Image (tube, rainbow, N blue to C red):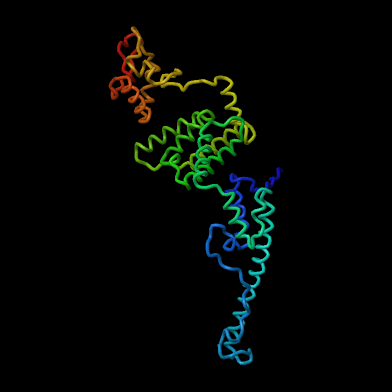
Amino acid sequence: MSLAIKTAVVLNSPNDWDEWIEVIKTRGIGGEIWQYTDPAATGLPLLEEPRLPTPKDVDSAKSKISELDEDEKEELRVLRLSYKRKLALYDRQKVALANMRSFIQETVSRTYLVYTFDCDTPHDMLKALKKRAAPTDRARKIELIQQYQKLKEAPQAVNIEAWLQQWEKTYKECKELKLPDVDDDRPLYDFLQAVSSLAPEFSSIWTITIQAKLDASEELPDLYKIVELFRNNWRLVNAQRGRGPHSAYAASFQKQSEEKTDEKRLCLCGEPHNFPQCAYLIKSMREDGWKPDPTIQRRINDKLKIPALKRAVERARQAAGEPADEEAEEPQGEDDVEEPTAF
């Protein structure tokens, strides 16, 4: 049985701020003191010891319990029970605030420790640290853009689960800062392109599915859903191959890279070239006496029933100065095919 290893989050640089302040917040909420420590809050309440209710809280004209009637005594008893609960909460919060001071100083590097000195409260300490360690919005945007661009590259020899978590985390932070890099459906295509070397079938199927949904004006899945589907597919592949939880795609990618690092994507005809170089799709690419293979032609016709692929071929034809909307013809026998369609 493997045991989880606890790793303390230490504030060493601005890169650590977001994770570190979340740990502090979790501790503050658990101790019921976050409202007294939140560095972003203004006009914080003061933690004050509750006052013991007296007979005057029941009847301002009476100062002794003996002066109260039975109903008033019962009311005072209820008030004092409430007081005991408030006092217990106050005692816990007082201890939690004291512990928070120690916890903050224990989880910052010596570089930042000096900023916690001469601070009366944990709130003052966190405000001072935020001023010096929290990245500005502009700096954070630049960092996130760099992280996002790096994630768009296929991982090599890396923990895939950690890489997927980084995708989710970076995407969430980019959305919070409203960065244009994650607008609309762009992240879906970026992610599918990033995993295309690891799981080409998964990437192709979902790229086509997204195009089909767009054509049908259907709602697209968000990035979290696509990552979840990829993660489940990855785990299934691991289980079927009997590999460890972090090795399957890394090994697969390494093998593909070793075999052919510059392999091109296959055309609809099965050859490693782009649509504009395909004689089956572009008439101007056909040499004298060229004839199509009926099996390949039929396979191309079937694939071009997919709207997304058909549009891509039409664009390639337009770029070559040919009609984009030619109708597909059923392939004839090998001996009597003379002038095949572009499909």
Q: Nearer the viewer, residue 234 or 167?
A: 167
Residue appearing at x 45%, y 39% in the figure: 181
Nearer to the camera, 85 or 179: 179
Q: Position of residue 104 (x, y in %)?
A: 66, 55
Image location of residue 222, percent across then percent down: 45, 42
Residue at horizontal 50 percent and vertical 20 percent from the top: 263
| Residue 279 spot, x, y in % from top left | 37, 15
The tally of labels here is 0
Between 28 and 72, the one nearer to me in the picture: 28
- Mark yes or no: residue 228 visible: no
Identify the residue shown where x is 59% and y is 25%: 254
State the quadrant of the N terminus.
top right
Vertical placement of residue 112 versus 343, above or below:
below
Position of residue 319 measured from the top left corner of the image (x, y, whole percent): 33, 22
Q: Quadrant of the C terminus?
A: top left
Q: Which residue is at a point 37% across and 38% down the rendered structure image?
A: 214
* Vertical arrangement, residue 4 with respect to residue 235, above or below: below
Instruction: Determine the residue located farthest toward the top in the rendered image.
Output: 289
Q: Measured along the vertical axis of the image, is residue 258 above or below residue 7?
A: above
Most foreground residue, 299 or 34: 34
89 lies left or right of 335 = right
Q: Is residue 157 left or right of residue 190?
A: right
Quadrant in which residue 162 is drawn: top right
Taking the image as shown, residue 102 lies to the left or right of residue 311, namely right
Q: Residue furthest bottom?
A: 67
